[in-house]
Image (cartoon, helix red, strand yellow):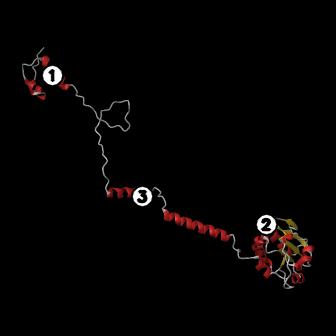
Amino acid sequence: MARVAPNPLCLQRFRPYLQSSHSSPSLLKSTFHYQTKPRKFPAVSCQTNPDSSETSTPTEKEVLEPGPVSDDTKREDTGASQDSGLPEFPNKDVNKRIAVVSLLAAAGLFLSSRLDFGVSLKDISVAALPYEEALANGKPTVVEFYADWCEVCRELAPDVYKIEQQYKDRVNFVMLNVDNTKWEQELDEFGVEGIPHFAFLDREGNEEGNVVGRLPRKYLLENVEALARGEGSIPHARVVGQYSNAENRKVRSAVDPRSHG
């Protein structure tokens, strides 16, 4: 077998010290093995959630030490807090405005429920039709027995006024003051024991029923509506609510014989 001589040109790929012709095969083998052995380098990777079980090398951290804050920094922080959309606490001026608006709203609500607060018993009695005239004109009539000292009478005055304005063309409205001795006979005739006492008379002057004391407005309204239509009866003929005792009346004589007050 022919012997192949080593090619010295192939040895130029390695270190220069391998070019010596006197190197032994074993030395070349070991040297070649050392050069072709792969080199391992430590790999560095970043983990978002490192496992606590794995050991990590300490790294240097930048530590910020507190120091004096300048006015510019304060203004920037204030602007950032305002831009963050967090609610701000109202100041005293805002609280005062809210209080004033609340008071005005409450006053408006109260006045809206008392639109007729200026109507009094005296106003209604002055505008009422005299009793004798009401019995002679051929219209149905509502007779109210009242007194100036009667709290329930004063309370119902606005409702009575509204109904009177609505039906005054078809129904007579008469006011008789129980303190006036002129109406002693009518007090006995209609059996007035408590006030306000509303007597409902047909076109001939016959009583169809009565309502006494504080009751819902619809009782008076529905009875007046029945009279205006000429119905033979009223829906609420005998109803009694909270009233003032007529025995507490302050008897006085009428100055004007025609007075119905």
Mark identifier at residue 216: 2
Residue at the disc numbered 3: 82
Asked whether the residues under the numbered discs 1 and 2 touch, taking CB atoms below 8 Å apart as contact, a structural biologist would say: no
Residue type (three-letter) at the residue carrying disc 2 = Pro
The disc, 1 or 2, on the residue closer to the chain's N-terminal end is 1
Residue at the disc numbered 1: 31
| Nearest to the observer: residue 138 or residue 193 | 193
Graded by Cα atoms within 10 Å as few (under 14), some (14 to 19) or many (20 or more), the crowding at tag 2 reads few
The C terminus is located in which quarter? bottom right
Q: Say which element carries label 1.
A: helix
| Nearest to the observer: residue 64 or residue 243 | 243
> Where is residue 249 drawn, in percent x and y?
84, 73
Q: Residue at the location (81% across, 70% down)?
A: 220
Q: Say which element carries label 3.
A: helix
Graded by Cα atoms within 10 Å as few (under 14), some (14 to 19) or many (20 or more), the crowding at tag 1 reads some
Mark identifier at residue 13: none
Q: In 3D space, how far apart are the residues under numbered discs 1 and 2 (Cα atoms)?
A: 120 Å
The disc, 3 or 2, on the residue closer to the chain's N-terminal end is 3
> Where is residue 163 drawn, in percent x and y?
78, 75
Q: Is there any visible trace of residue 171 in the rendered image? A: no
The disc, 3 or 1, on the residue closer to the chain's N-terminal end is 1
Q: Say which element carries label 2.
A: loop
Q: In 3D space, how far apart are the residues under numbered discs 3 and 2 (Cα atoms)?
A: 56 Å
Asked whether the residues under the numbered discs 3 and 1 touch, taking CB atoms below 8 Å apart as contact, a structural biologist would say: no
Residue type (three-letter) at the residue carrying disc 3 = Gln
